[in-house]
Image (cartoon, coloured by chain):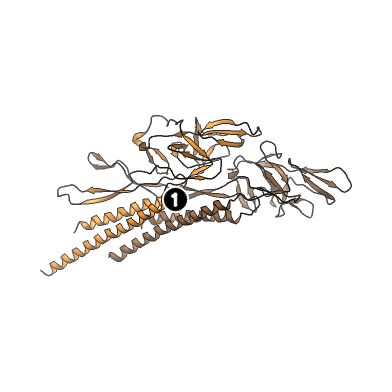
């Protein structure tokens, strides 16, 4: 069958995947701590139909051959870990990381996941938990009679209890960093898991050793730029239409030959 | 048998091959750093023990359009676009040095700088490896500097320099993997020497240099040409039918 059909089909499916990526970015324009994805395109292998330098006659070579490309693919998506805007919420348990680093969340199965989404609350036991109810790691327990929970830039959590004037230290929130954050696996719910590509987590105190500081009363907004995504959406849509035009033109050629020959 | 039938058939077949070349260009309209392929037809007369009346058409790729695509602003520090002529040198899985203009780079677990597709980016003396850093900058001449982990933010340490090469255009061709390399006849004895005058822009990527409209028009034009070839084939068929009828009436 006509080879251009298969080539354009790869173009259509790559633009399709790109559109899914863009729509997911746009859908998460208000998701706290969300990092936008970018699809990475790459051309597929080339087939050598005729080697350059083939003999035209006994003593003359053809200057060029015929190498035909077979289309395009999406190698993968990369997360862009640029800083989102910090929005002031005035909630004492809202945290934003200003700089590099991830907060750690203990999943129910005992594994650790990583997040930039710092909308924390207390559960019935007084533990600091994320919106899904998973506890922060290291676990910080706020006693029932505590008021004015303060979280310092270095992660120190303290609170004033009713019977004491001086604040009590409740624990330290640590951050982790990865040598290649783009290698983290996004598992949804604003959480990431470490992979071989991301490397092992390096834990440290916020504000030291390249880690960002913790900002209380703020959350980090999504880093999706709406205008950029819309422009990408338009170019993707048009590229898709043009590739589908090639498919229909090719189809008409095949139709023409079946109608006229035979 | 009328020889026009064969000429029409081979013309239609070569049209399809040219269309594949244009379809591939169009499929790669969003591929960063992609360089479009030319397609042309060459006339191939048949010489032999007869009068040379027959010329077949043959599709071929005379070369690749190495002109630059538009720069897209991404704002990412490890996205690098080459300004003007020249290429980034990268090392593929086979250990061979190839050239590209698609400079979206990442740092892997071992600190090696790689393209998104996994090829190692070359520096002054082999692949670029970075120490753990808080911040990284790629300068206009390809110099890579980092703020080491825990270091003061105003102290950039120069680590390496991207290997930027500028071989003559006529010595280059696109390989089967889509990367640019020197033609077999133009190979150097040693590695490609870096060019100190080249400039890169960090925070930008170069878009594909495919003109989508042009590729679409080429494809439609080839479709119509194909239909003309098919018409020749049907005419040849009608001619042979007509001569068969004449013979029946003898």
The front one of A131 and A94 is A94
The front one of A133 and B220 is B220
Where is residue B180? Give x, y as percent.
41, 40
Residue B19 as seen in the image, left or right of residue A190:
left
From where the camera sits, is residue B92 visible? no
Seen as rendered, the residue at the extreme right is A163
Where is residue A206? Give x, y as percent.
71, 40
**What SS does tag 1 mark?**
loop
Residue B135 as seen in the image, left or right of residue B83:
right
Where is residue A94? Give x, y as percent.
73, 50
- Hue used for the chain lettered B: orange
Q: Label 1 is found on which chain of the structure?
A: B
> Residue drawn 61% across and 54% down?
A29
> Residue drawn 41% across and 55% down?
A8
Q: Quadrant of the N terminus of chain A?
A: bottom left
The front one of B241 and A215 is A215
Residue to which mark 1 is pinned:
B29
Where is residue B76? Give x, y as percent.
56, 43
Q: Quadrant of the C terminus of chain A?
A: bottom left
- Hue used for the chain lettered A: brown
From where the camera sits, is residue B122 visible? yes
Residue B86 as seen in the image, left or right of residue A228:
left
């Amino acid at each position: 069958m006509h080879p251009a059909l298969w080539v354009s089909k790869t173009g259509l499916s790559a633009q399709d995947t790109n559109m899914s990526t863009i729509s997911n970015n746009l859908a998460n324009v208000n998701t706290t701590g969300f990092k936008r994805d970018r699809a990475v395109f790459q051309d597929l292998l080339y087939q050598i139909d005729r080697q350059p330098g083939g003999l035209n006659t006994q003593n003359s070579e053809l200057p060029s051959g015929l190498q035909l490309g077979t289309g395009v693919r999406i190698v993968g998506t990369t997360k862009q870990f640029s800083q989102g805007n910090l929005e002031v919420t005035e909630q004492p348990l809202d945290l934003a990381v200003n700089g590099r680093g991830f907060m750690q969340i203990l999943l129910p199965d005992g594994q650790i996941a990583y997040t930039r989404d710092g909308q924390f609350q207390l559960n019935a036991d007084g533990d600091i938990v994320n919106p899904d109810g998973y506890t922060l790691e290291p676990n910080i327990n706020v006693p029932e009679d505590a008021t004015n929970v303060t979280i310092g830039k270095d992660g120190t959590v303290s609170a004033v209890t009713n019977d004491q004037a001086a604040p009590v230290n409740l624990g330290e929130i640590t951050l982790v960093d990865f040598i290649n954050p783009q290698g983290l696996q996004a598992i949804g719910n604003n959480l990431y898991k470490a992979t071989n590509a991301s490397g092992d987590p390096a834990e440290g105190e916020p504000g030291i050793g390249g880690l960002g500081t913790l900002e209380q009363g703020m959350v980090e907004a999504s880093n999706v730029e709406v205008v950029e995504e819309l422009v990408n959406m338009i170019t993707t849509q048009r590229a898709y239409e043009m590739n589908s035009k090639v498919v229909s033109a090719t189809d008409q050629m095949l139709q023409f030959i079946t109608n006229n020959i035979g | 048998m009328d020889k026009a039938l064969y000429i029409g058939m081979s013309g239609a077949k070569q049209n399809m091959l040219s269309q594949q070349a244009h379809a591939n260009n169009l499929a790669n309209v969003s591929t960063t750093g992609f360089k479009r392929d030319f397609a042309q037809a060459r006339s191939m007369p048949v010489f032999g023990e007869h009068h040379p009346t027959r010329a077949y058409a043959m599709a071929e790729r005379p070369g690749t359009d190495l002109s630059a695509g538009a720069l897209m602003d991404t704002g990412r520090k490890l996205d690098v676009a080459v300004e003007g002529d020249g290429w980034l040198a990268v090392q593929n899985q086979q250990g061979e040095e190839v050239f590209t203009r698609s400079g979206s780079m990442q740092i892997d677990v071992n600190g090696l700088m790689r393209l998104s597709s996994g090829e190692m980016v070359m520096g002054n003396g082999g692949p670029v490896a970075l120490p753990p850093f808080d911040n990284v900058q790629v300068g206009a001449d390809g110099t890579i500097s980092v703020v080491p982990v825990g270091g003061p933010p105003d102290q950039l340490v120069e680590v390496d320099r991207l290997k930027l090469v500028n071989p003559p255009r006529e010595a280059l061709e696109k390989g089967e993997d889509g990367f640019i390399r020197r033609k077999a006849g133009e190979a150097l004895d040693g590695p490609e020497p870096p060019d100190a005058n080249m400039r890169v822009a960090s925070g930008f990527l170069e878009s594909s240099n495919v003109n989508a409209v042009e590729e679409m028009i080429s494809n439609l034009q080839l479709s119509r040409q194909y239909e003309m070839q098919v018409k020749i084939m049907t005419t040849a068929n009608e001619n042979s039918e007509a001569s068969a009828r004449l013979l029946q009436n003898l």
